[in-house]
Every structure is written in structure tokens, then in C-alpha cells.
Image (cartoon, rainbow, N blue to C red):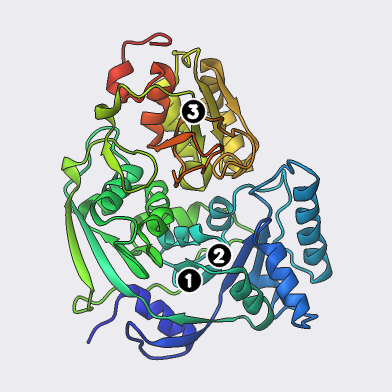
Amino acid sequence: MGQTVTEKIIARAAGLEAVRAGEIVEARVDLALANDVTAPLAIAEFEDAGFDKVSDPARIVLVPDHFTPNKDIKTAGQVKKVREFARKHGIAHFFETGRAGIEHVILPDMGLVAPGDLVIGADSHTCTYGAVAAFSTGVGSTDFAAAMAWGRVWLRVPQTIKFVYHGRPGRHVVGKDLMLHTIGMVGVDGALYKAMEFAGEAIEDLPIDGRFTMCNMAIEAGGKSGIVGFDKKTTQYLQSRPVGSRARTAGQVFASDPEAEYAQVVEIDAGAIRPTVAKPHLPSNTVPAEDLADVRIDQVVVGSCTNGRLADLQQAAEVLKGRAVHPDVRLIILPGSQEVFLAASRDGTMQALVEAGAAFSTPTCGACLGGHMGVLAAGERAVATTNRNFVGRMGDPESEVYLANPYVAAASAIAGHIATPDMVTTAKGGA
């Protein structure tokens, strides 16, 4: 019997010839990461257990990105604890404010993740790295502490659901729409503890940025991981990464066998998907963006670990160039990394956004989780390219978050209500 790509990666990491869904294995971790929220908890567990040495400093990554730049004294103390731990244990992959960005953008871009890797992270959106054909999944701080100590993790091999996207998406339909549509179909627990394998013509055509977005949001369907098979686009992305001590352009490439056993195969017509929005308060509460034109908004956020790459900012700038943000709307841009920030400044993307009335932030997760840099007040509504819209996610419990792609977010910023780019093509300012 054949294996899925996920089963092959886990088998390799566990030192086994093959694994089957449902088996419990002990696997070697190629990379373990945590941030300024989860690392302090893990450090406390690590030290309380009596460990005084990490198993391999080169396989640990610490990225302060949730409440950075530090928003208050408490968060400054959190980051200080992580910083001191990194120095004490010689962890070179500690990324200080101003030197990197959001963890799920910088790790693959800096070459820390390679195809075939097994990656765990004390952050639920660690599943992002499946876009480069790696198995990556979120774990708790205790599991991360154990990985720091022993370099290994216990896993139950997940079943895989294969999502096959036929045809080609229409204009202004990107990876975010494919994923929101999918989550709307299966629900927030439709892929519970399953690997979500994305395939089909639409995925083959999808740029790497869109693949990152889709894998990032696998957790919003309850998924254990998301993954896209290795292909030419993967190779092109790997070769574009910087050459240096951190960059890894190779890895062990696996592919699902034709006879692999899937828990389910879901067929989706990508050509029928329109720009999609998830209404409050679940990522599965999806409708076409055009159906929500009566929803007035107060804020728009473009960026985060889900849609903070250069292509995402360029999509927003394409709509906003030569136009103006509605006077009743605040538009906040959250680039995923310092490199994205610089690239956007070089190619005119930043200029187009700022001239339209956007505020650029340093790379941070702050607005996404209602921490800082864009907290919502009671009764306010936001359109965001982030990944979650639960009650109180971006601020007051009486605020609302609508999830959308960068095109829709930008159009909504112009219109003052949820809109598609087609609705604002003739707009020269606020609607």
C-alpha cells in the first residue's frame, strides 16, 4: 500500500520505512520554533524540569513577533526572558525586532525550512511551511520545551484529506479565497487532526505566496497540517532564497504515491469561486464578497503571517494606486518581514499605499490578535487579511472582523464598506 507525502516525511523523521495513519511515533525534529507568547512558558517548563542544555541550538528558532515592538512593561519582560535564554544557550536563530519579522514569513524565506522537514512550533499557524513540501504543525509550549531538551516529539500520524482544485480561478481570486471557500465547505472542524493535501490544476498554477496562505489556514479547518507537493514553483522559490549560513535550498523530496490511502478526496471547482469573505465569528462563515456591500467598516488590515508577503501588498497597492482610503476608514499595513518592507519600498508598493492613506507598521502580529497596532473598539468592524475572526479576536468582544483577500481589503478601504475591486474601479476617493 502506498503512502501520502505526509506519511513519508513522518516515517523519515521517525527512522521507519513506513508509517500508517493512527500510529504513534517518536520523530526527530528538524526545526522547533516559538514566539514571545509561547517561548516564556516553554522556558519555564524546560528549567523547572532541570534541563541546563538544549539538544541542538541550531534547530531552535525564537521569534518575538506577537507583542513586538514591546507594547508595555509586561511584554518587554517576556521578550527579555526569551532573549536571555537565547544568549545563554547559544541559539543563533533568535530574531530581534528590526532584524526579521513575523515567524511564519521569515523562517521559510531565510531558508530555515526545507522540503521533507518535520517542523513543530509553539504556534498554531506553524502549518504554513507545508507550502514548501514540509510537514509542519503547531504544538503546545510543553512539547516545544521537550523538543528543546531532546530534539524529538511524539506524534500520532494523521489521516490525509486530499483537496483537488480543478480549473483556474478568476480575476482577483487568490489562495485566500480558495482556502476560505474550502473552510466554508468543510467547517472549522472538517479536517480535525487531518493533514490537508492541496492538489489540482489551480494549485499547480498558484504562486508560492498563495500556497503559504492556504497551508497557514489549515488549522482554521481543524487540520493538523497543510501541504502542497513539490514542483517547479517550489524549486523556483527555494532558489530565490538568500545564499548564506541559514539558507537551505535542498531537502528530501517526497511525493504521495498514486495508491496512497486518503480519508477523503474533495473535488472543488476553482473556476466557480469568487472573492470570498468570512463573516463574524468563524472562518467558515463564508459568502461572496459582493453580497456584503451593505456592511460598513471602520478599519482595514493588510498583512500578518497569512497575507503579509510582497505579493499581498502589491495586490492591495494595485487597487489603491491613485485612489484614497475612505475618510471613515483606517488602513493599516503589516508587512511580514523587514525584507518585505524593503522590497515594497523599492518597487513603489509602499508609496502607492501611503499616498492612498495607509499607515505602515513594523512587522508584527500585534493587530491580528488584538494585542496592539490596531485594536478595535466596541461596535467597530474591520476587514482583515488575517486568519481568525473569533469574538474579540482583534479587540473588544463587541467588535467584528471580516476575513478577506488583499484585493477585497483594499477595495473595502476605498469604499468604506465591504467591496470587490470591480466595485471601485471608477472611484477616485471615498464612496
CB-based contact (under 8 Å), mark 2 and mark 1: yes
Q: Residues within 10 Å of mark 2 (few under 14, many from 20)?
A: many
The image quarter in which residue 5 lies: bottom left
The C terminus lies in quadrant: top left
- Residue 226 percent location from the top left of the image: 38, 62
- Residue 392 percent location from the top left of the image: 51, 42
Circle 3 or circle 1, nearest the eye? 3
Circle 3 or circle 2, nearest the eye? 3
- Residue 164 percent location from the top left of the image: 21, 59
The residue pinned by badge 1 equals 251
Position of residue 396 relative to residue 246, above or below, is above
CB-based contact (under 8 Å), mark 3 and mark 1: no
- Residue 32 percent location from the top left of the image: 60, 69
Q: CA distance from mark 3 to mark 1?
A: 49 Å
Q: CA distance from mark 3 to mark 2?
A: 47 Å
Residue at figure coordinates x 68%, y 71% from the top left: 58
The residue pinned by badge 3 equals 379
* Amino acid at pointer 3: Gly
Position of residue 210 relative to residue 149, above or below, is above
- SS for callout 2: loop
- SS for callout 3: loop
* Amino acid at pointer 2: Arg
Mark 3 or 1, nearer chain start: 1
Drawn side of residue 74 relative to residue 151, left or right: right
Position of residue 148 relative to residue 308, above or below, is below
- SS for callout 1: loop
Residue at figure coordinates x 27%, y 54% from the top left: 204
* Amino acid at pointer 1: Gly
Judge by depth and name the residue closer to the eye, 180 or 324: 180
Judge by depth and name the residue closer to the eye, 277 or 34: 277
The residue pinned by badge 2 equals 248
The N terminus lies in quadrant: bottom left
